[in-house]
Amino acid sequence: MTFPEELIKWYLFNKRDLPWRHTKDPYVIWLSEIILQQTRVEQGLPYFNKFLENFPTVKAFAEANEAKVLKLWQGLGYYSRGRNMHATAQVVMEKYDGKFPVLHDELITLKGIGEYTAAAISSFSSGEARAVVDGNVFRVLSRFFGISTPINSPQGKKAFYNLANEMLYTNDPSTYNQAIMEFGALQCKPKSPNCGICPLNLGCYALKNNLVQVLPIKLKKAPQKHRFLNYFILIHNNNVLIRERQVGDIWQHLFDFPSIETSDATSLDDNDFMLQIKSTFGNDVDAQFITHKRHVLTHQILHIQFFELKNYIFNFSKQKELYWVSLAGLNERPQPKVIHDFVSEYF
DNA sequence: CACACGTGGCG
DNA sequence: TCGCCAAGTGT
């Protein structure tokens, strides 16, 4: 038995009895779909009932004032959904004579209705062959077929949309769409799905390859972190001390000056910072601030300060990554770009 | 196109 | 506790 047919079989036996599954009325389905965007069924269900009681028809919805709509929406989150619904209800009254559209291409033009919702309403209410792609579909397809392309990357979205439409059971798009989403919500759950009782476990790539906990892959935002690098320029007999950066951090194998990294912005007046300098370079050291700059990388923002050191003690020779370099011959060294920028800037 | 938008539940 | 996730969309 094929993938979509297995899903539908599972669905017919295991589906929850939800109110919006008893109708093909596009208005009612629209109501449920908007409410369920990024929202769990348990959380959205009371709102669905509340909205249907207050606004049994699009007409009633359109004639309500926005304040009442938002009042009813209170506590659901993503309040633009409520405002967009109100606007859409009025467009349906004016442009569609109060008859809620059922075609994808019409639905997609309405406020608050994107690719997912247009596919959902059109397939559920008119049987149009449009595959829904939501968080559940990403997960089910990613695991079953072993797709590791990140679901939130442009390539990933394209790949999953294509695959979803290839898999679409065109004999019954409505049931298939509901089936794959319900399957993702109840069986192929994000965390600890019970693969032992899964009807698709024999053909599941993720289960076979022990990737259920890994797929789908979602790229993290990686918020930019701030780092404070304090560089020390040590000059002796017309030589300057540089250091090769080690593996496990930015600029691997590139050269820069010896430095102390701190968790905050620092100044020489800062006791802790001065203590660190002395413990590293010797108590008699005399540090002098030269200049600072910001260096913005993809995942981090570097705050860089330069200090010139005088009267330091030569306790660096033991460290392998440190090198004395002739100031005059700097440009002849195997030059890492980074040090070259810094050096050319200050010498 | 990366990001903001809300709230509640879960491990 | 806290990050992740939940039937996405608009900008």
Image (cartoon, coloured by chain):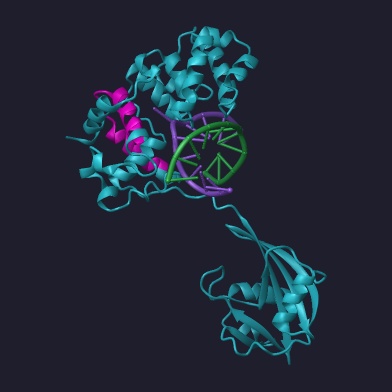
Chain colours: A cyan, B green, C purple
Residue A140 visible? The answer is yes
Q: Is residue A3 left or right of residue A97?
A: left
Q: Quadrant of the C terminus of chain A?
A: bottom right
Q: Nearer the viewer, residue A203 or C10?
A: A203
Side of A103 where A301 appears, left or right: right
- Read off the magenta span: A157-184
Q: Is residue A162 magenta?
A: yes
Q: Foreground: A117 or A158?
A: A117
Give coordinates of residue A11: x percent, y percent.
Answer: 28, 28
Residue A344, quarter of picture = bottom right
Whether A12 is among the magenta residues is: no
Q: Which residue is at a point 45% across and 9% down the rendered structure image? A: A99
Residue farthest right in this picture: A269
Q: Position of residue A313 (x, y in %)?
A: 73, 89
Q: Is residue A124 left or right of residue A335?
A: left
Residue A204's spot in the image, x, y percent? 25, 45
Picture layout, residue A62 above or below residue A198: above
Q: Residue furthest bottom?
A: A237
Q: How many marks?
A: 0
Residue at x 74%, y 85% (from the top left corner): A282
> Residue A78 falls in which quadrant of the image?
top right
- Of residues A251 and A72, the one nearer the viewer is A72
Residue A339 higher or lower than A177, as above or below: below
Q: From this view, report whether residue A6 is shown above or below residue A128.
A: below
Location of the N terminus of chain A (image quadrant): top left
Main SS type for the magenta part?
helix
Q: Is residue A94 visible?
A: no
Image spot of residue A107 (x, y percent): 45, 21
